[in-house]
Amino acid sequence: MVELESQEEAATMKVASVKHVTATVALRAGAAATSLAAAVLVVTNRQERWGIEVNFTIFDVWVAFVATNFFCAAYSLITAAFVKKLIGKSWLHTLDQLVVNLQTAATAGAGAIGSVAMWGNDASGWYAVCRLYRRYCNVGAISLALAFAAFLSLGAACTLSRYPRTRARH
């Protein structure tokens, strides 16, 4: 009798609910779109004043920000496309956490440099360069907001990957 019950349980397959799949795809697609938008904004952002051009390649942290956001966009898009096959995989949550943490670190690093550029630092004698390059800094602030939205969206998807809602199918 016990053996028959375990065979029955083995025959029962866990399938993700439609709402769970839809929410996961939407969150991952949202993360992909906002990450991609943040990276493209930074790459295309330039301003010249008095013969001095500023762009993202001046600061290594912005180069890392761009690379991380392109990676996050690709990861989010790929996992959104294959979400039905990936739900319930134990490694997905771990990989999601890694990508969320990379996104957070890149956004925080770029935000720290952006903060110094925006307000300067009197103690170290760093001048607030955004007074001179306002348009460049405004676009950078928008890209940081988009990257933060990507972090929130992928963070929510990460939570869903940890606790997938499933229903039994016979």
Image (tube, rainbow, N blue to C red):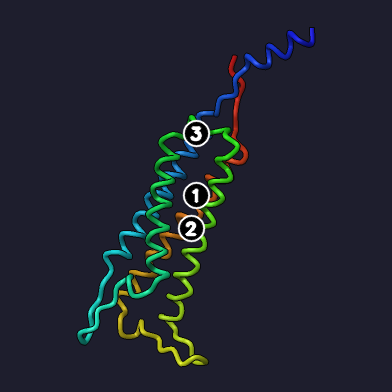
The x and y percentages for residue 124 are 50, 91
Q: Which marked residue is nearer to the observer: mark 1 or mark 2?
A: 2
Mark earlier in primary sequence (1, 3): 3
Crowd around label 3: few <14 · some 14–19 · many ≥20 (10 Å): many
Secondary structure of the residue carrying numbered label 1? helix
Horizontal side of residue 80 vs 44, given as left or right: right
Residue 167: quarter of image: top right
Mark 2 = which residue?
Answer: 103
Mark earlier in primary sequence (1, 2): 2
Q: Amino acid at mark 1?
A: Leu
Crowd around label 1: few <14 · some 14–19 · many ≥20 (10 Å): many
Q: Quadrant of the C terminus?
A: top right
Mark 3 = which residue?
Answer: 21
Q: In terms of depth relative to the viewer, which is nearer, 42 or 118?
A: 42
Crowd around label 2: few <14 · some 14–19 · many ≥20 (10 Å): many
User: What's the residue at 63%, 17% (across, down)?
Assistant: 12
The x and y percentages for residue 70 are 37, 54
Q: Amino acid at mark 3?
A: Val
Q: Quadrant of the N terminus?
A: top right
Q: In terms of depth relative to the viewer, which is nearer, 112 or 64?
A: 64
Mark 1 = which residue?
Answer: 154
Q: Is residue 65 above or below residue 52?
A: above
